[in-house]
Every structure is written in structure tokens, then in C-alpha cells.
Image (tube, grey):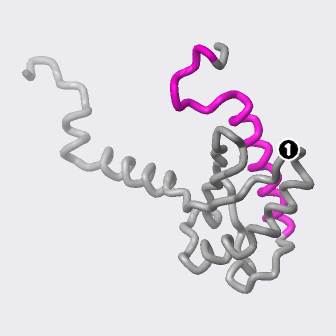
Amino acid sequence: MTAKHSRPGAPSQRMLRVAEEIRHALSAVFAREEFRDPELHGVHVTVTEVRASPDLKHMTAFVSALGRDLTDAQLAALKRVSPFLRREVAHAVRLKFAPDLHFQPDTALNYAMHINEVLHRPEVQRDLSPKAEGEE
């Protein structure tokens, strides 16, 4: 599928590829724990997804702390260290411009756990189970 025929608003292949490279670069920086913000000391930040703006100048990284939500203080700390992270990403991924990094909590795991809980409720199980012969 070419860019001319893709869905409006859908990310291009280049956006997806660059976002994935940025995710890998950020993950490597977080694994090295080189930043010195006390709020992030000992926190294992996981980058689950990165979304790129069409011009590749802004990247939104969805983050969690090993399956837990980051606190507001930890998200604020990520914002404080974003200039350092931006420099590290710029060294790792060659782009015309170093992208601005924005951090959002990843809520996908919480949402999946909620859906799983709903699916296991007795009233939902009753509706999902195949009806026995003769019932209807």
C-alpha cells in the first residue's frame, strides 16, 4: 500500500519505523539508568510504544514502571530529564531534527486487566457460554 492510498490519519511506514527506533533508543537509555533525578532512582521505566508526529519532530512515549503506573512525580521527572534523553536519542538515531519527547502513562495493561475481569464475571460468562441443547 503506498502513502497515497493509506487511510487518512494513519501513520506512514516512515513514522512507524522511526518511532520504533526511538523506542529502542529510549529503552537503552533507561536500561543504563544514566540520569540523576532522585524521583527516577531505582525505577525501571519500560517504554511500551512511541508514536511519531507526521513531521517526526515530536515523539510521544508511552511508559510504565515494569507493569505499574508511574506516579505524577515520576512523570514530572521524565519531563525534567527529557533534554538529556533527547540528546541521547539524537546520538542513537540519525534524523534531521532531534525530536521533542513527550511522556504519557501507558494504561493498556490496566485496561486489559479490567476487560479480563469483566469477561470473567458470572453474568458475562453465562452470556458467552454456548447454550445447551434444548435451551432457547
Where's the C terminus, which quadrant?
top left
- Amino acid type, residue under disc 1 in the picture: Leu
Q: Quadrant of residue 37?
A: bottom right
* Span of residues in magenta: 4-32
Lateral position of residue 134 relative to residue 95, left or right:
left
The residue sitting at 66% across, 44% down in the picture is 52
Lateral position of residue 9 relative to residue 99, left or right:
left
Residue 42, percent from left and from top? 74, 78
Q: Nearer the viewer, residue 97 or 133?
A: 97
The residue sitting at 46% across, 57% down in the picture is 110
Q: Which residue is mark 1?
A: 95
Which element carries disc 1, helix, strand or loop? loop
Q: Main secondary structure of the magenta part?
A: helix
Q: Total number of numbered labels?
A: 1
Residue 121, percent from left and from top? 26, 49
Q: Quadrant of residue 38?
A: bottom right
Q: Nearer the viewer, residue 126 or 67?
A: 67
Q: Quadrant of residue 72?
A: bottom right
Where's the N terminus, which quadrant?
top right
The residue sitting at 63% across, 66% down in the picture is 65
Residue 24, percent from left and from top? 79, 49
